[in-house]
Image (spheres, rainbow, N blue to C red):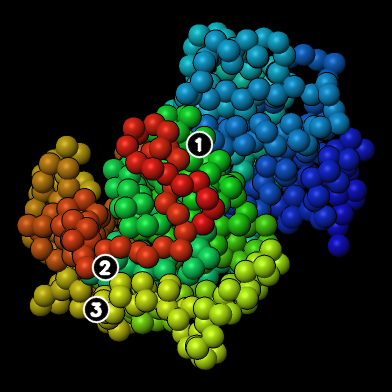
Amino acid sequence: MTTFQELGLNEALLKAVADLGFEKPSEIQDKAIPVLLSDDTDIVALAQTGTGKTAAFGFPLIQKTDFNNRQTQGLILSPTRELCMQIANELKLYAKHIPEFKSVAIYGGASISDQAAQVRRGAHVIVATPGRMQDMINRKMVDISNIRYCILDEADEMLNMGFYEDITNILSFTPENKNTWLFSATMPQEVSTIAKRFMKNPVEITIGSKNTSAKNIEHEFYVIQGRDRYIALKRLADVNPDIFSLVFCRTKRDTQQVAEKLIEDGYSAAALHGDLSQSQRDTVMKSFRGKQIQMLVATDVAARGIDVDDITHVINYQLPDEIETYTHRSGRTGRAGKSGVSMVIIAKSEVRKIKSIERIIKQTFKQKDIPTGIEICEVQLLHLANKIKQTHINHEIDRYLPTLQDLFVDDSKDELIKKFFSVEFTRFFDYYKKSKDINTQVATFKDFGDSESRSGGSVRYFINLGDRDGFDWMQLKDFLRESLELGRDDVYKVDVKDSFSFFNVDASHADKVTTFFENFAFKGRRVHIELSQNESKGRFSGGGRGESRGKGFSEGRRSKDFKKPSFGNNFDPAKKKDFGKKEKWSKKKY
């Protein structure tokens, strides 16, 4: 077994390792640190979120820094301010016994003049978000013309968020003889492009296979009607009483709505998205890390800075637009060697996407049923029983024991147990006794693929290309036919709208269409296709992306599955602090 001493770290860093309680290096640390310490080379390192990538580049960066030189020698770019601050804080911990080392975090939402002043006082390493870094370069507040190392952390996510132009502009101000270290969870085409353009013969280190998910994460999917999506979320939470979870939505609006509804229904929940102020985000994250929040509902962008090792479940309330993003989501659980579960709630029309994700992560999903009401009641009852059995007795209650014994003198042991547990069990039973089965059956992927959205042996697709992309119906037909290498009449019923279109192909070509468009970009923009049951429903037909925006979400609100008799407390610190609701809040941990 490799130790940190064997990796070549100096004495000061080894002391920090001991202080942090690191026992042995992770696989990415074991492979990357010796290479970065011994060679002046570019590197492309692919490893899942939560595998210790920050230490993998942080320790070598600190050790190779010349502390006698006050100029900035290292630049770390990260996609979000949360991740930026996290990296900066970790560097300070790694350099705990090296007082000469100085690092500065540069990100939006804070005073740019204060950050510039910190840089002027000396910053061996700058950790920055691309947008703020570009702004400071434009204002001539920073000088990165002499850096020796540039680290692109979570490179795939930065490019997915549209930072390609910012990154290329920033790199243009750096010297050509620098070393570039690129760390990423996945390797989509955009990351390959930037590696080829800005790196020289990089050493490639891959932990597992490219784009694969961690082996200690179980992947499950649940098929429901679109209108039951929110009900399904609540039941999955209730059947896992100790859940400590991240719930992912596509949009800020859906994230806020789902979080507010969970709070109304008695769950310890909060929202995390880009419309929150920095103080709100800090308050939410502090409460989440302290486990005052049981379910954190987040957008993909906002969740990039979350570094919490104890998350038990990731729930995909909606699948991401980019399939590769699923790898980032699922990587928020199963961290630091622990196991985790990634759940996907989907409508029947989305089942095909599961196969696409399986091909990318190289793991198999298990299809499971949303639990029934009586199953949830049983789980909650046994959970309460185990919790009571493991409770440490507070002997201060001894003085009241005679009174309690007199009160229950006429009750048998069985009656006493029934009465005791009925206090909580009855609330769950009354809540769920009339609940319905909300599962939608899908026999197999093959059966789905051969039947869904098909009529007379054809398949109708939605595609996010349209008139604004320069297509009329004939041009789009030719584009599809040539791209897919199909015959002249194999693409038909082409209907072009402003920003999207529909088209049909024969059922025999369905797999070719799905495979071709998995990682396809048109003029730098990712192209998506989806099965369409009825074009009049537009993009969201069949319970797709519009579920929580329209009918689906409102029906969830009207559901009889309405209130959770929570054993915990409702707490939304962001809402308490900034949203101005006149409510009473409890800060007790759930």
455 relative position to 247: left or right: left
Q: Is residue 484 above or below residue 222?
A: above
Query: As shown in the figure, which amino acid type bears the numbered disc 3?
Result: Lys
Rendered image quadrant of residue 223:
bottom left
Disc 3 to disc 1, C-alpha distance? 38 Å
- The circle on residue 434 is 3
Q: Position of residue 66 (x, y in %)?
A: 82, 22
> SS of the residue at dot 1?
helix
Identity of the residue drawn at 21% across and 65% down: 559
Whole-angstrom CA distance, mark 3 to mark 2, is: 9 Å
Return the disc, 3 or 1, that comes first in the chain's sequence: 1
Tell me, for residue 283, which label it has, or none: 1
Residue at 86% x, 31% y is 97
Q: Position of residue 276 (x, y in %)?
A: 40, 33
Kindly identify which numbered label has been placed on residue 469: none
How much space separates mark 1 and mark 2, taking CA atoms? 30 Å
Task: State which tag comes first along the sequence, 1 or 2.
Answer: 1
Which is more N-terminal, label 2 or label 3? Answer: 3
Q: Are marks 3 and 1 in contact (CB under 8 Å)?
A: no
Q: Quadrant of the N terminus?
A: bottom right
Q: Secondary structure at mark 3?
A: loop
Please report contact status of discs 1 and 2: CB closer than 8 Å, yes or no.
Answer: no
Residue 95: quadrant of the picture: top right
- Residue at the spot of label 2: 561
Residue 450: horizontal and vertical position, in percent?
A: 23, 78
SS of the residue under disc 2: loop
- Decide: few, some or many residues near mark 3? Use Cα within 10 Å; few <14, some 14-19, many ≥20: few
